[in-house]
Image (cartoon, rainbow, N blue to C red):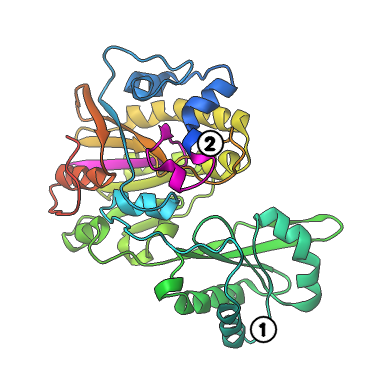
Amino acid sequence: MSRVILIVLDGCGVGAMPDAAEYGADDPASATLPHVADAMGGLTLPTLQALGLGCIAPIAGVTPIANPVGAWGQSAILSKGKDSVTGHWEMMGVITETPAPTYPNGFPPDMIAELEVAIGRRTLGNVASSGTEILAKLGEDHMATGFPIVYTSADSVFQIAAHEDVIPINDLYEMCLTARRLLTGPHGVQRVIARPFIGDGPHGFTRTKRRRDFPLAPPEHNLLRALQTQGVGTHAIGVVADLFPADLFARRERTQSNPAHLAAILRAIQTGDEPFVFANCEDFDMLYGHRNDPAGFARSLAEFDAALVGIWNALKPGDLCILTADHGNDPTTGSTDHAREYVPLLMFGAGLEGKELGTRATLGDVAHTVAGWLGAKWDGSGTALI
């Protein structure tokens, strides 16, 4: 049986795209993996080096080798955007021509008023903020009033935070479903996110693992839907399960950390039934890129590189593994936002011989590669990598 294991190294870009200046002041100077390597005096990533990572971009410590295993190259992002939803949708053949709405100054008052009427409560916040900052600022007010906290980030998200002892978790989920129904058309944010937390003011607040995402549905013409209609099941691992509607997957595992993601990928290869495994390793982006922590980023890369050996060895005849990213998130710049960068492409398994892929125009090439390898029909933008 032919299978594809697609692993997204979230935020692991390799250099600014030509249009980076349109996306932020720090974006033209961003080069996530090269800059992490420079900041740490070089990286030691023997598995990724063998696959050809050093041939894609100058990454200190990752030597470009003469005969990498498999295929290597990089891809531009054709879509308008530099966020996870845009990148993952493009991998599945959906090109986003209009950037998703963002709200750096908070949401329009009439939008908040409509939500408050619908949920029967006032809200707090309505600002762009990090999750830790907003809880430190408004957590005690929330506990005193029972009003949920609404906030956003640099991404196209509408987040509602509530203490689990103040607003029961299922009530929080219902509020998010209500927001999702309201946020359509020009205000169609990519994700509504439930952000439950615990704790108190004197001892601090902590977000719990009962977060839930309510994604905007992609256009029906996407690879996941095409695979589904042709009887080819997809197994979603990690944040992938939050970026697309649940009905597109035969199996979903919302793992919460890179070690858990990698363990789930290994199980899927060893015992899974779905021909397409679509996984995301988000710690690079979530824990280190957004927090300007190159040391943590480098450590996480080394852990991934070591775990990749087990994944590589577990591949069966007919298995193709593809590694890529959805955007950049350079922890060495002044920004804590995503960056508009080229992303790496590395492919191995199934006796694949060394091949240079060059610079691809769109991550839609991944969709064609997945479909072709699995014997499915797909006619979206792009061409197959092999």
Give the quadrant of residue 73. Answer: top left
Q: Residue 69, percent across and down? A: 27, 21
Dot 1 alpha-carbon crowd within 10 angstroms: few under 14, some 14 to 19, many 20 or more: some
Dot 2 alpha-carbon crowd within 10 angstroms: few under 14, some 14 to 19, many 20 or more: many
Position of 131 relative to 16 (above/below): below
Position of 342 relative to 37 (above/below): below
**Residue 357 shows in the view:** yes
Q: What residue is pinned by disc 1?
A: 121
**Pointers 1 and 2 in contact (C-beta within 8 Å):** no
**Residue 302 shows in the view:** no
Give the quadrant of residue 266. Answer: top left
Q: Residue at x 33, y 64 (%)?
A: 218
Give the magenta range: 1-27
Look at discs 1 and 2 and give the one toward the viewer: 2
Q: Residue at x 54, y 21 (%)?
A: 38
Q: Is residue 380 left or right of residue 168?
A: left
Q: Nearer the viewer, residue 182 or 50?
A: 182
Position of 377 relative to 331 (above/below): below
Q: Is residue 92 left or right of residue 112?
A: left
Q: Residue at x 55, y 73 (%)?
A: 173
Magenta highlight on residue 143: no
> Type of residue at label 2?
Asp
> Type of residue at label 1?
Arg
The kind of secondary structure element at disc 1 is: loop
Q: What residue is pinned by disc 2?
A: 330
- Gap between marks 1 and 2, in whole Å? 39 Å
Figure label count: 2
Q: Residue furthest top?
A: 66
The kind of secondary structure element at disc 2 is: loop
